[in-house]
Image (spheres, helix red, strand yellow):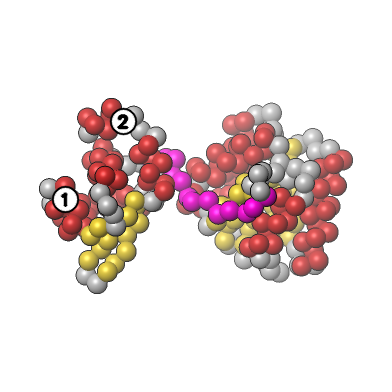
């Protein structure tokens, strides 16, 4: 089972294209986000989505959630609740819809990455459907872990934990412990190669480090 969550504007294709690109089965659910004062054009877009998707799955579970768009915080919280209560594989579509819907959904998405399996972006320039990386905005790494992550960016990874410890003149146990914590946050990826474990910084890790004050990083 998959649950799709997507804002819906006046262009139904921004929902239909990414949903069909991922696939649609009988048990799937599509949740469309619209403003609380939906217009006739919004209703028409909903009907267009329904007309296309129910050709694929006649008994599709398709419904609308109306966001309190004038209250940004409440809209974010509403989206978080939708994401965390979604059943099965959760797919969030970032594309289309008014900014008052899209911005809260973006914040909710990257604040709830552990509850989401796939993030899709529908491009404004070329209308392509792209998968986005999960980005952890919570940043719960300790100072020591953040320092190691910053140092890993200066190395030519992937490297084994043994090689990292040697390059940075740290103990293997310390590096391994910090790497495990960073992997839990999604800042690094690890892969076993025989008895060795190789480490690579993820896009999420790069964004996390580059969002830090560089002067503060030098003091760690």
Left or right of residue 46, residue 117 in this image: left
Pick out the residue farthest to the bottom.
Answer: 194
Is residue 86 among the parts visible in the rendering?
A: no
Q: Compared with residue 165, is residue 137 higher up or lower down, i.e. above or below?
A: above
Q: x and y percent of residue 41 in the render?
A: 85, 41
* Vertical comparison of 199 with 70: above or below: below
Q: Please give the range of residues in magenta.
A: 127-139
Q: Nearer the viewer, residue 220 or 78?
A: 220
The numbered mark at residue 167 is 1
Disc 1 element = helix
Residue 186 included in the magenta stretch of the image: no
Question: Going 75% across and 42% down the picture, which residue do you hit?
Answer: 9
**Residue 16 appears in which quarter of the rendering?**
bottom right
Query: Is mark 1 in CB contact (under 8 Å) with mark 2?
Result: no
**Callout 2: SS:** helix
The quadrant of the picture occupied by the N terminus is bottom right
Residue under numbered circle 2:
214
């Amino acid at each position: 089972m998959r649950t799709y969550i997507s804002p819906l504007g006046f262009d139904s294709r921004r929902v239909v294209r990414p949903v069909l690109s991922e696939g649609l089965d009988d048990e799937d659910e599509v949740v469309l986000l619209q403003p609380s004062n939906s217009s006739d054009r919004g209703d028409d877009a909903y009907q267009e989505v329904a007309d296309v998707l129910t050709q694929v799955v006649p008994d599709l579970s398709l419904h609308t959630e109306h966001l309190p768009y004038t209250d940004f915080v409440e809209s974010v919280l509403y989206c978080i609740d939708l994401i965390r209560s979604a059943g099965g594989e959760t797919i969030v579509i970032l594309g289309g819809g008014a900014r008052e819907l899209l911005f809260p959904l973006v914040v909710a998405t990257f604040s709830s990455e552990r509850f989401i399996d796939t993030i899709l972006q529908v491009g404004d320039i070329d209308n392509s459907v792209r998968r986005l990386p999960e980005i952890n905005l919570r940043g719960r790494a300790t100072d020591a872990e953040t320092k190691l992550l910053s140092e890993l960016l200066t190395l030519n990874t992937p490297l084994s934990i043994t090689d990292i410890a040697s390059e940075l003149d740290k103990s293997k146990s310390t590096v391994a412990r910090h790497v495990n914590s960073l992997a839990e946050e999604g800042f690094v990826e690890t892969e076993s190669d025989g008895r060795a474990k190789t480490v690579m910084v993820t896009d999420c890790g790069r964004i996390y480090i580059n969002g830090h004050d560089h002067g503060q990083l030098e003091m760690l």
